[in-house]
Amino acid sequence: MSKKVVLVTGSSSGFGRLISQALARANHKVYASMRDVNGKNAANAQQIFDLSLAESLDIQPLELDVQSQSSVDQAVNTIIDECGVIDIVVHNAGHMMFGPAEAFTPEQFALQYDVNVLGTQRLNRAALPFMRKRREGYLIWISSSSSAGGTPPYFAPYFAAKAAMDSLAVQYARELSRWGIESTIVVP
């Protein structure tokens, strides 16, 4: 596989960090995005920068808050300005809450959907025009094995939002295949 330009959301820690590092080590150009790279996530952004120097990897932290269309647009435009393309988008950013389902307000449920579903929609609207123009691209959606079964208990808002994201991913796969854009749901 030739070197690809990859945008990974939620790369400050967890799966996003691991995915970003693995793709960079596989010789791809990786934008490890996260929110607040100069504040809350400054140490995480610095660790990614340090890794790029220590291992001569093509990975860099990128400011991207999936809850802000302007942040998403700015991040995508930065990548397009620097590389001319985005080959792969990894929808990994997520938010989780713990507790009995009935304890959460509708607004708290809405927060889950905003990050885990609407965040993917914001990014797709920004990145897909560039992929469609080239008739090439790949969307990877990081889901949850529990979204189908709700195990363990007390994660209902997260599981419901991930199930909604999965449904959205399936619809995108059907719509985008005619433009050579592929989709995969990854269920860790």
Image (cartoon, rainbow, N blue to C red):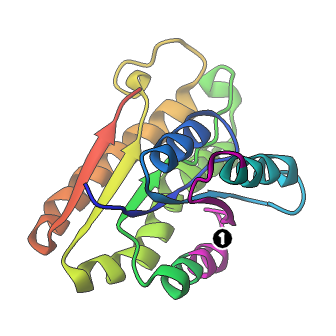
Q: Position of residue 177 (x, y in %)?
A: 13, 64
- Residue in the image at 62% along x and 81% along y: 74
- Residue in the image at 33% along x and 57% along y: 139
Q: Which residues are magenta?
A: 54-75
Q: Position of residue 80 (x, y in %)?
A: 48, 83
In this rendering, is residue 14 above or below 114?
above
- Residue in the image at 35% along x and 82% along y: 130
In this rendering, is residue 129 above or below 186?
below
Name the residue tied to disc 1: 68
Identity of the amino acid at label 1? Ser
Q: Secondary structure at mark 1?
A: loop
Magenta stretch holds residue 59: yes
Taking 94 as reference, is 89 left or right?
left
Q: Position of residue 29 (x, y in %)?
A: 49, 62
Taking 98 as reference, is 141 left or right?
left
Dot 1: within a 10 Å radius of its alpha carbon, few (fewer than 14), some, or many (20 or more) residues? some
- Residue in the image at 66% along x and 65% along y: 64
> Residue 188's image quarter?
top left
Q: Position of residue 41 (x, y in %)?
A: 82, 51
Magenta stretch holds residue 155: no
Residue furthest out toward the top: 152
